[in-house]
Amino acid sequence: MKFALVGVGGAGCRLVDRIMQVEQNSDRSFSGGNVLAYDTDKSIFETLDAVPLDRHVLVGDTHEALGSTGADGDIDQAAAVAQEDRDELHREFDKLDLHEMDAVFVAAGFGGGTGGGVGPVIVEALTAVSELPIYVLGVLPTTAEDATITVNAARSLQSFVTHGDNTLLFDNESWYDEERSLAEQYEELNELLAHRLLAVFAAGERQSADIAENRLDTSDVMRIMETGGVSTLGYAEIAVHNPTTLFQRLRALFYNGEEETTDAIRITQLVKAAANSELTLPCDRTSTERALVVLSGPPHLCSRKGFEKARQWLEQETETVVVLAGDEPRPTADDLRVAVLFSNVTTVPRIEELKESALTAIRDQS
């Protein structure tokens, strides 16, 4: 699939920048440079390496209500400014070749004033001007952050889910190392999320890709994402021996049944490991409406038998009959990777906890 990327706020802009870097380093044609970065604080743009200067959009620079550092966590003020400057925000969309895209990802940190305030306005505006699916890539704050950020996150989550076609979430609380500051970990967390995102949504988009045995079509991904609601990603990988000599390659083409069985078992175990891994948003997998599995690695190791058996296991595990699967051949790879997308998960303790904390904070403020 081809995605336009729109980052909103500091967290969203940094995440989009990292996705573009991973895209470039992996020889993928995921966004093709179709990117915009919106923020109310121009200093954020100085931290971006991959997003071109002409795609930096400063929001509210003529509004006295916003200080030199932007929205400063004021979600209502940021949303009001975005609504007032809506036409200017629209004009920036002309820089995106939306007619060449399959969908748009809008990335934002839900706890920030700009991400939580301007982000939903951007999503709503894109929905108004394009028939493409508008997906949200959202980052939830940690429990250690202050009450304002918690309230912002709960409010913006509701807005994003309402206006977006699907909201893929990453929970900082589940992933960051408490012994280090969150700011010190932004880059590695964004890298982690970027790799998982591309493993699913950029499958088959390598510039020199081989033909997949079970190719995923754009319609397959859209079918999984059309559930709406919130979604999460699982991921696992293992190192493998990839034959390099002609003899080894020929032998791999005509391996015996024992080796085939071994490959099938390995893939089944890898899919189970991905499903049982630390998800980008922890949840009860049985509350999933639909799921998607993507296997990536050397073609001769991508056992069809193992893949089908793993897909059946996932159907039983998630208690859903809508589980689609596809593979991404990487002939020179020395690893096997599996990414699993769980779409519209409804039993998510972290979201319930976030809502309760927000309500408590609101009561304490009143």
Image (cartoon, rainbow, N blue to C red):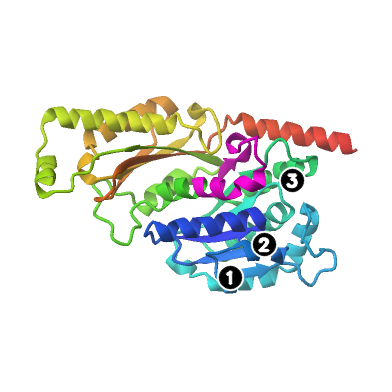
Residue occupying the point 40% across, 53% down = 202
Measure the alpha-carbon separation of dots 2 and 3.
20 Å
Magenta-tinted stretch = 168-192
Please, what is the three-letter code of the amino acid marked with disc 3? Asn
Q: Residue furthest right?
A: 366
User: Quarter-wise, where is residue 30 in the image?
Assistant: bottom left
Q: Which residue carries the number 2 mark? A: 44
Q: Residues within 10 Å of mark 3 (few under 14, many from 20)?
A: many
In x, y percent, where is residue 215? 29, 49
Q: Which residue carries the number 1 mark? A: 55
Left or right of 360, for residue 209: left
Measure the alpha-carbon separation of dots 3 and 1.
26 Å
User: Eyeballing the image, is 253 above or below 6?
Assistant: above
Please, what is the three-letter code of the amino acid marked with disc 2? Ile
Mark 1 and mark 2 lie on one chain; the one further toward the N terminus is 2
Measure the alpha-carbon separation of dots 1 and 2.
13 Å
Q: Which mark is residue 152?
A: 3
In x, y percent, where is residue 56? 62, 69
- The answer to whether residue 283 is seen in the rendering is yes
User: Eyeballing the image, is 14 above or below 294?
Assistant: below
